[in-house]
Amino acid sequence: MIFTRVAFILFLGLYSNILLVSCKDQNVTEVNVTEANVTELNEPDFATPEYILPCSRKDPKIDSCFLGTLNHIQPYLVKGIPELELPSIEPLVIPELKIENGQGPVRIRAFFTNITAIGPGNYSINKVRVNISSYRIDLHLSLPKIEVNGDYDINGNVLLFPIQSHGNFWALFGDVEAIARIQGVEEVRDGIRYMRIARLLIDFSLGRVRFRIMDHLNGNNVIGQAMNQFLNQNAKEIIEEMRPAASASIAKHFKEFLNTAFSKLPMKIWMHDT
Ligand SMILES: *[C@@H]1O[C@H](CO)[C@@H](O)[C@H](O)[C@H]1NC(C)=O
Ligand SMILES: *[C@@H]1O[C@H](CO)[C@@H](O)[C@H](O)[C@H]1NC(C)=O
Ligand SMILES: *[C@@H]1O[C@H](CO)[C@@H](O)[C@H](O)[C@H]1NC(C)=O
Ligand SMILES: *[C@@H]1O[C@H](CO)[C@@H](O)[C@H](O)[C@H]1NC(C)=O
Ligand SMILES: *[C@@H]1O[C@H](CO)[C@@H](O)[C@H](O)[C@H]1NC(C)=O
Ligand SMILES: *[C@@H]1O[C@H](CO)[C@@H](O)[C@H](O)[C@H]1NC(C)=O
């Protein structure tokens, strides 16, 4: 922790020096930025909201403490936490998701809108690993069943077969196992420390997949029906091909989702120093 703080101050010091140098070069009037007032902490004793079960940096069992925190917050996430601008995750509504895959047998650009997912609230956390000095958090989650529907617009080609389709889709994913790797950074705003997610990596595996699309573009013509059938019959392979791109897109969504919350939640509230 001390190491991180020192590193952070050094980093800011370095950063302000670079700023000064570049300002000098451009002959702009320079401001004497000192490190002190950038990083000086002034953290009041915040009240602990009911949805937070704080952990301590010094807790030798911080992993299991975090597991408790994540289990405790689950019913609140299901309902949504307005003061953190977190909408309900049950159902989880994702206004839009863009997935682009430019290589391999499935080269498509898919744009999903108005996505509604039923089942994310039933997550269970199997494993948590936390390294609080480097803000590294790994989570292993299982989701028994996720049912998703929404609108889609895809074009590209699958096995050189040109695809252009838009309409509604419905999908059922069973026995989803996911791993989320969070790399956080500490940020100080007005003397208060916050954690921001700098990087979020998600990977998942799907036990079962059922998938149906209802194409609106090609209507009931023969090509439209053939394409529909082709996509439905190859759904599992297509999803497997799209998995890295889909993971990246889902991670991007959740990174924004979570950073909105973290930016409103001083670190001291969920992570005590003593
Ligand atoms: C930069 O500032 C110095 C001193 O104020 C002045 O002599 C010089 O002409 C300035 N250079 C430019 C490029 O404005
Ligand atoms: C900038 O601040 C440092 C430390 O407070 C001080 O020693 C230095 O003289 C200041 N420089 C200018 C140009 O004000
Ligand atoms: C930081 O400190 C410097 C020198 O003491 C001061 O001029 C500046 O206004 C301060 N900046 C902030 C954001 O408080
Ligand atoms: C999402 O759905 C709502 C209601 O079903 C509709 O009004 C809206 O236009 C849709 N948005 C998009 C981007 O398709
Ligand atoms: C969540 O799990 C409970 C218990 O297994 C089940 O009754 C419920 O239907 C599930 N909810 C959803 C949205 O899948
Ligand atoms: C936590 O991360 C730091 C920096 O990467 C590393 O030096 C340290 O060994 C890690 N601690 C544990 C318990 O893994």
Image (cartoon, rainbow, N blue to C red):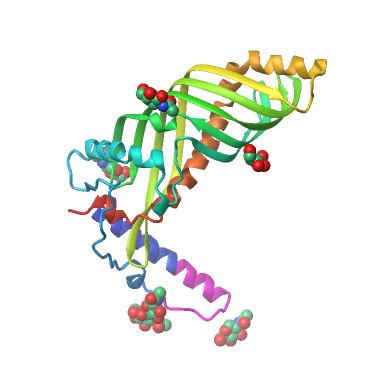
- The residue located at (57%, 79%) in the rendering is 27
Is 25 in the magenta? yes
Does 25 sit above or below residue 45?
Answer: below
- Front in this rendered view, residue 210 or 262: 210
For residue 143, side relative to residue 25 (left or right)? left
Looking at the rendering, the quadrant in which ligand 1 lies is bottom right
- Front in this rendered view, residue 230 or 218: 218
Is 176 in the magenta? no
For residue 152, side relative to residue 92 (left or right)? right
- The residue located at (29%, 58%) in the rendering is 5
- Residue 211 in sight in this render: yes
Which residue range is magenta in the image?
17-33
Does 109 sit above or below residue 224?
Answer: below
Image x and y of residue 180, in percent? 41, 34
- The residue located at (52%, 81%) in the rendering is 29
Image x and y of residue 158, in percent? 70, 21
Q: How many marks?
A: 0
Image x and y of residue 176, in percent? 44, 23
- Residue 143 in sight in this render: no
**Res 164 → quadrant:** top right
